[in-house]
């Protein structure tokens, strides 16, 4: 397996420290609101990666955190006059529901920041003792100047990072670029006892402490969105390396590209977002997952209604093919070509192309009159196996093709299809053609197949 390492800026052969056990940490959500579809790209992509790693290496210990103490959470709680847990519990549940809708499996560990306050305080004490942090006016700050490699991940020197960042100028800072590890809380904010003040942790230290607590001082893979590379991931490296006596923090850094919407990065602050729970009410969730995997994970992805519609149409064809070979017994088997594509820095577009090829080959053989045999069974196994590797094509074909079946509109469409069949049988071709045109105008595609007449929405 070859993975692009943001730290070295090269594709490198991946091998875990322990040949039989991979450790992976992915930055999770700050739970103060519903997440948008851009927040779903990383979890979907790294869900595919976790599965591939399990097949390749055996055990994977995959942690994805929940940030449940944050100024945005505090603001929401104060506005609604409720404790922060009322906000975080609600939106943690919503987040897990949204991820499940996208077919994202739960990670092995889902640590919360509030559940690791003692670990955070202990790590801060280590940093102070080692001379990398200092306490001032109830705050504790990391001294950027104390870590010579600061800026290596983002590829810029500290002065450039400082110039390009929004930095708080505060009297308790020795250097404007120093960042907060601990800050005091007033009566309106959640707080915990510490040697420095009744306060709460800074954002960056939370992930460092949680990763160390569950995965060890050096982990194999740390992943997240490219927007987290600086300052969050840069600061995680500085804290973790300095707290652990110079040991590397993460051996591989993987960053997924952003989703663009109407030409700009999808962002709550801009307001150009599509919430996952709104999208799954309007579109099949599997199509959203397909769309998120349609571009290479490191590249930006332009999100649009057309992308979703194309994903739906593609899945219609794939499930239609599986329906036509439903009687053929086959056990899903992930083809070597699929594993090779995933080993090539998680090349999901190449896997989707392979899936299309397996389906096309099946349709070609059906059109030639084949109805059974080992070749069809092998192709079906490949198609299902490739889908399995991507978290796709695991529904029963009828469930996908007649999603929402049982409602009045489906019954009406089926009645029109049946009427057309009867008209053709009676050689009333004018009526049959008129019914086909009526159905086509409503977005219904009629397919005359060797297995009978099928219909699906376009």
Image (cartoon, grey):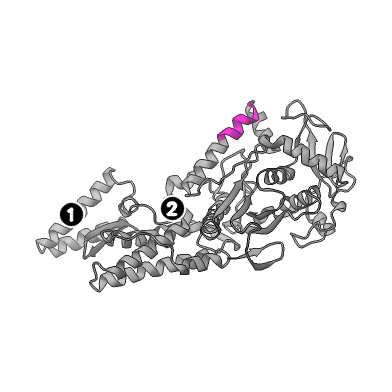
Q: Check disc 1 and report the residue beneath it.
A: 418
- In the rendered structure, find residue 321 and report the number of the disc placed on it: none
Badge 1 density bin: few <14, some 14–19, many ≥20, Cα 10 Å: few
Q: Where is residue 39 shown, x and y percent of the image?
A: 58, 49
Q: Where is residue 178 shown, x and y percent of the image?
A: 84, 47
Q: Where is residue 220 shown, x and y percent of the image?
A: 66, 56
- Give the label, 2 or 1, closer to the camera: 2
Exactly how many numbered labels are in the figure? 2
Of the image marks 2 and 1, the number of the one nearer the N terminus:
2
Tell me the residue at 68%/46% (across/down): 211
Tell me the residue at 79%/47% (across/down): 243
Measured along the vertical axis of the image, is residue 268 above or below residue 200? below
Is 55 situated left or right of 437 in this image? Answer: right
> Which sits in the foreground, 197 or 333?
333
Q: Check disc 2 and report the residue beneath it.
A: 286
Q: Secondary structure at mark 2?
A: helix
Q: Is residue 113 visible?
A: yes
Measured along the vertical axis of the image, is residue 397 above or below residue 173? below
What secondary structure predominates along the stretch shown in magenta? helix
What span is colored magenta in the figure? 81-90
> Which sits in the foreground, 432 or 320?
320
In the rendered image, residue 353 lying in the magenta stretch gets the answer no
Q: Secondary structure at mark 1?
A: helix
Tell me the residue at 67%/29% (across/down): 78
Mark pair 2, 1: CA separation: 29 Å
**Image quadrant for the N terminus?**
bottom right
Is 137 situated left or right of 251 in this image? Answer: right
Measured along the vertical axis of the image, is residue 410 above or below residue 300? above
Measured along the vertical axis of the image, is residue 236 above or below residue 294? above
């Amino acid at each position: 397996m070859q993975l692009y390492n943001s730290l070295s800026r090269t594709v490198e052969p991946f091998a875990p420290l322990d040949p039989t056990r991979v450790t992976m940490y992915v930055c999770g959500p700050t739970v103060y609101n519903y997440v948008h579809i851009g927040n779903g790209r990383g979890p979907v992509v790294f869900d595919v990666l976790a599965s591939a790693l399990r097949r390749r290496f055996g055990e994977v210990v995959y942690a994805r955190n929940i940030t449940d103490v944050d100024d945005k959470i505090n603001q929401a709680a104060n506005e609604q006059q409720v404790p922060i847990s009322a906000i975080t519990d609600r939106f943690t549940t919503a987040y897990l529901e949204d991820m499940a809708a996208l077919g994202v499996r739960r990670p092995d560990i889902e640590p919360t920041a509030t559940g690791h306050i003692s670990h955070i305080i202990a790590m801060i004490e280590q940093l102070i003792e080692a001379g990398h942090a200092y306490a001032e006016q109830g705050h504790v700050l990391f001294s950027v100047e104390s870590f010579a490699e600061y800026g290596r991940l983002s590829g810029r020197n500290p002065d450039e990072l400082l110039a390009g960042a929004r930095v708080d100028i505060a009297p308790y800072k020795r250097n404007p670029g120093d960042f907060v590890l601990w800050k005091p809380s007033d009566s309106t904010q959640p707080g915990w006892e510490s040697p420095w003040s009744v306060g709460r942790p800074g954002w960056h230290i939370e992930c460092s402490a949680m990763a160390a607590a569950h995965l060890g001082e050096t982990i194999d893979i740390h992943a997240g969105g490219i927007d987290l590379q600086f300052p969050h991931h840069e600061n995680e490296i500085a804290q973790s390396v300095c707290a652990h006596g110079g040991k590397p923090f993460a051996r591989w850094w993987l960053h997924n590209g952003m989703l663009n919407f109407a030409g700009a990065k999808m962002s709550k602050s801009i307001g150009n977002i599509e919430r996952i729970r709104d999208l799954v009410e309007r579109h099949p969730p599997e199509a959203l997952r397909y769309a998120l995997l349609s571009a290479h994970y490191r590249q930006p992805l332009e999100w649009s209604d057309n992308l979703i519609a194309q994903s739906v149409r593609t899945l219609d064809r794939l499930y239609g093919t599986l329906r036509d070979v439903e009687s053929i017994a086959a056990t899903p088997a992930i083809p070597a070509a699929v594993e090779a594509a995933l080993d090539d820095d998680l090349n999901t577009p190449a896997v989707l192309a392979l899936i299309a090829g397996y389906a096309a080959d099946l349709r070609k053989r059906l059109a030639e009159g084949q109805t059974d045999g080992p070749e069809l069974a092998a192709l079906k196994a490949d198609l299902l196996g490739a889908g399995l590797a991507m978290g796709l094509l695991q529904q029963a074909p009828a469930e996908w093709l007649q999603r929402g079946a049982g409602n009045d509109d489906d019954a009406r469409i089926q009645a029109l299809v049946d009427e057309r069949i009867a008209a053709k049988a009676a050689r009333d071709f004018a009526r049959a053609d008129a019914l086909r045109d009526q159905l086509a105008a409503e977005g219904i595609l009629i397919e005359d197949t060797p297995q009978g007449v099928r219909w699906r929405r376009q």
